[in-house]
């Protein structure tokens, strides 16, 4: 399995069938433009990414950029495509028992009901919507871990947005007793519950899903797409010109970066 280097992220260059065949254990993240920009300024997020076992392309933008730089990614594998493919692939595998963690109150439970009906067995053994800011409450985090452990789940599908979901998995991975597969799936639980509509496939294939989502949720997503998008292309230009430097490549990097990185960090943290 090869990989494609985009900025300071390494994306696995594999197809959906190959991923499903090899995904017997480990952590799966699905990098997109938003992730790659955050990886320039957030060390904890960067460390979580480094420790992941699978990183698949969750963006047609990344897909097209990889072709432009001469290292084409074979297939876009977003979390919202991977997760249903995963549970359908394992519908007769009784060792696969999934816990859904994320989305607003009641949404994960509705996703559980729909998925189990689709699969024809209770493949989703538990569902819970954590409180807003749960990741800052250690007591609640441990309660969530206990809930998952008591369910007997062997797969944790966490959909609370980046970088919270990746940091949570990285921080608490060893505390889960039965979980062998961890999947950070973003808004997928909302999609599975029918709570949020996905972009039509033709829009996604054109690389315009970001625009569809921006129009659908402008107040929540304007910064991600209108600020982080241009920032990403600036970093890609630096990579093409061989001027890009991984901000976490050395211990001294964080205090010795150029004004460009520092100003970008201020914008993103504003």
Image (tube, rainbow, N blue to C red):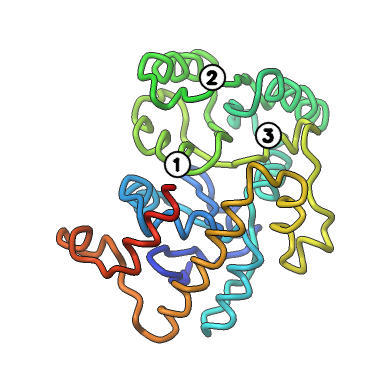
Q: CA distance from mark 1 to mark 2?
A: 17 Å
Closer to us: 180 or 175: 175
- Residue for point 58% across, 68% down: 62
The earlier-in-sequence mark between 1 and 2 is 2
* Figure check: 78 above or below 15: above
Between circles 2 and 3, the one closer to the viewer is: 2
- Residue for point 66% across, 49% down: 82
Residue, disc 1: 166
Quadrant of the rendered structure where residue 120 is?
top right
Q: Position of residue 41 (x, y in %)?
A: 35, 55
Q: Position of residue 32 (x, y in %)?
A: 56, 58
Instruction: Tell me whether the residue at label 1 lies in contact with that at label 2, contact meaning CB atoms closer than 8 angstroms.
Output: no
Residue, disc 2: 131
Quadrant of the rendered structure where residue 15 is?
bottom right
Q: CA distance from mark 1 to mark 3?
A: 16 Å
Please, what secondary structure does the residue beneath circle 2 have? loop
Closer to us: 45 or 144: 45
Badge 1: residue crowd in 10 Å (few <14, some 14–19, many ≥20):
many
Between circles 1 and 2, the one closer to the viewer is: 2
* Figure check: 140 above or below 120: above
Residue 189 circle label:
3
* Figure check: 23 above or below 1: above
Image side of residue 235 versus residue 158, left or right: left
Q: Position of residue 239 (x, y in %)?
A: 41, 79
* Figure check: 75 above or below 221: below
Closer to us: 242 or 194: 242
- Residue for point 26% across, 60% down: 248
Badge 2: residue crowd in 10 Å (few <14, some 14–19, many ≥20):
few
């Amino acid at each position: 399995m090869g990989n494609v280097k985009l900025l300071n992220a390494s994306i696995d260059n594999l197809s959906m069938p190959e991923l499903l065949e090899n995904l017997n254990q480990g952590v799966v993240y699905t990098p997109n433009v938003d992730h790659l920009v955050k990886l320039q300024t957030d060390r904890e997020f960067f460390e979580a990414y480094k420790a992941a076992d699978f990183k698949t392309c969750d963006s047609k933008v990344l897909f097209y950029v990889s072709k432009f730089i001469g290292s084409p990614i074979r297939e876009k594998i977003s979390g919202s495509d991977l997760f249903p493919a995963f549970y359908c692939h394992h519908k007769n595998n009784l060792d696969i028992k999934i816990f859904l963690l994320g989305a607003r109150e009641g949404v994960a439970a509705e996703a559980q009901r729909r998925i189990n009906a689709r699969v024809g067995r209770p493949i989703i053994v538990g569902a819970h919507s954590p409180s807003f800011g749960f990741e800052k409450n250690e007591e609640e985090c441990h309660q969530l871990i206990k809930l998952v452990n008591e369910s007997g789940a062997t797969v944790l599908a966490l959909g609370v947005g980046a970088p919270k979901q990746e940091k949570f998995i990285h921080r608490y991975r060893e505390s889960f007793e039965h979980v062998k597969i961890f999947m950070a799936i973003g808004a997928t639980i909302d999609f599975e519950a029918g709570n949020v509509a996905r972009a039509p496939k033709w829009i996604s294939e054109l690389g315009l899903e970001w625009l569809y989502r921006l129009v659908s949720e402008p107040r929540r997503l304007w910064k991600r797409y209108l600020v982080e998008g241009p920032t990403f292309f600036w970093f890609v230009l630096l990579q093409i010109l061989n001027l890009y430097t991984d901000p976490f490549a050395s211990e001294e990097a964080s205090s010795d970066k150029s004004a460009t990185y520092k100003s970008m960090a201020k914008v993103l943290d504003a």
